Image (cartoon, rainbow, N blue to C red):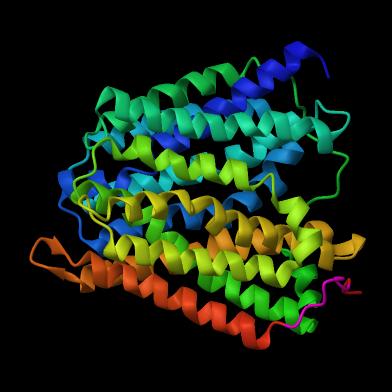
Amino acid sequence: MKTKTTIILSSMMFLQYFIWGSWYVTMGTFMSKYLGSSGIQIGAAYSALAIATMISPFFVGMVADRYFAAQKVMGILHIVGGILLFLASKITTNGAFYWVILFYSLAYMPTIALSNSVAFRQMTDIGTQFPPIRVFGTIGWVISGFMISFLGIEQTPLTFYMAALVSVGLGLYSFFLPDTPPQKELPASSAKSVMGIDALVLFRDKPYLIFFIAAIFVCIPLSFYFGFANLFLNQSGMQNTAGKMVLGQISEALFILAIPFLFNRIGVKKMLMIGMTAWLLRYLCFAYGNMGPNVWMLYTGIILHGVCYDFFFVTGYMYTEKKSNERIKSASQGLFTFVTYGLGMFIGTWFSGFVTTYYTVGQEYQWRNIWFVPAYIAVAVLLLFIFFFREKKEINIVK
């Protein structure tokens, strides 16, 4: 692949995730301050992305990949998305805000698969060429957090303005990306293939079934973090919170390098247990942390994101890959994504919203009680693994 193409694709990935990081982390804080939103209303807004995650594969697999050039569809969706983000900053009611975020999510989520498609089609060796390009997406997310803090716009609608501007910019930029024509010769995707139904055969394997159930429940602690950590840290008195929360993304990028090394040496069970223990420790840190003598606990809770996420979700993708035979590899990854980032996050966002509202007295959030709930769930999943997960270090492929 030419150096020029590498630079073009790396810039695309940077902007793709810069947009997401610009509004997603701080949306709960914005809703609480400007819309007077309850926990349920904040959770509902975050559930929009989960809904879009479940729907977008149908659009990409059954329509976009077969009939339209990927870079052109991506360009149109980002321009539409930019308009919707601008509208989101102007809305003053929770009901209207939810619908705008839902429609925006439906526009944005397909662009993740489309940007990957544009990149893959230019590569001769995806295994070695894609990771250095994809890492610019993480860098984009990190830089967006630093910019929000540097500009002092974290608790203002300007985060949506910034995301909208970059979204329109990427939309226009997309029309100059390498041509990625539709693959009409491919067999049409069906709802069955998109949802990974063929991979249900994996559930005959008891260890994988236990892991899969646990993965759904782990989405609940993840939803608490994405939906309410920024609001909590701001209310705790932390300054420039968005910039400090990128320590979690930096941690994620660093720990992911250790995953392949550890996967084959300590086994999947110990790695998943480390991930669950990290979730427990994170929420205990949030429950007892403050901007006084326990400020180190708040920073620890942020930095643990790398262990929490990588040791469960990245390990989960690798475990799913190892368990699957060649016939169902794509279906199994699609099923795992659909059920975790789709169904699991949908359940998690609503549940976290209900819990946060339940532990609200007047206008005050009872944060310690709130953080105890995902901590209890982490303990429950950890015990499930300790007593029922019996996977050999040498993973057996499901036939």
Query: How many marks do you count on the picture?
Result: 0
Residue 360 position by quadrant = bottom left
Q: Residue furthest front?
A: 293
The magenta stretch is: 390-396
Residue 44 shown left or right of residue 237 in the figure? right
Is 376 a magenta residue? no
Q: Is residue 331 visible?
A: no
Please tell me whether residue 134 is drawn above or below residue 337 in the rendered image. above
Residue 130 drawn at (x, y percent): 75, 33
Residue 17 drawn at (x, y percent): 52, 34
Please tell me whether residue 157 is drawn above or below residue 245 in the rendered image. above
The residue located at (83%, 38%) in the rendering is 127
The residue located at (74%, 69%) in the rendering is 197
Q: Is residue 376 visible?
A: yes
Residue 171 shown left or right of residue 327 in the figure? left
Residue 148 shown left or right of residue 133 in the figure? left
Q: Residue 170 or 68: which is nearer the viewer?
A: 170
Q: Residue furthest left?
A: 362
* Main SS, magenta residues: loop
Q: Residue 346 or 296: which is nearer the viewer?
A: 296
Residue 279 drawn at (x, y percent): 48, 65
Is 394 a magenta residue? yes
Quarter of the image where the N terminus is located: top right
Residue 370 drawn at (x, y percent): 28, 69
Please tell me whether residue 170 is drawn above or below residue 54 in the rendered image. above
Quarter of the image where the C terminus is located: bottom right
The residue located at (23%, 53%) in the rendering is 293
The residue located at (64%, 33%) in the rendering is 135
Q: Residue furthest top?
A: 4
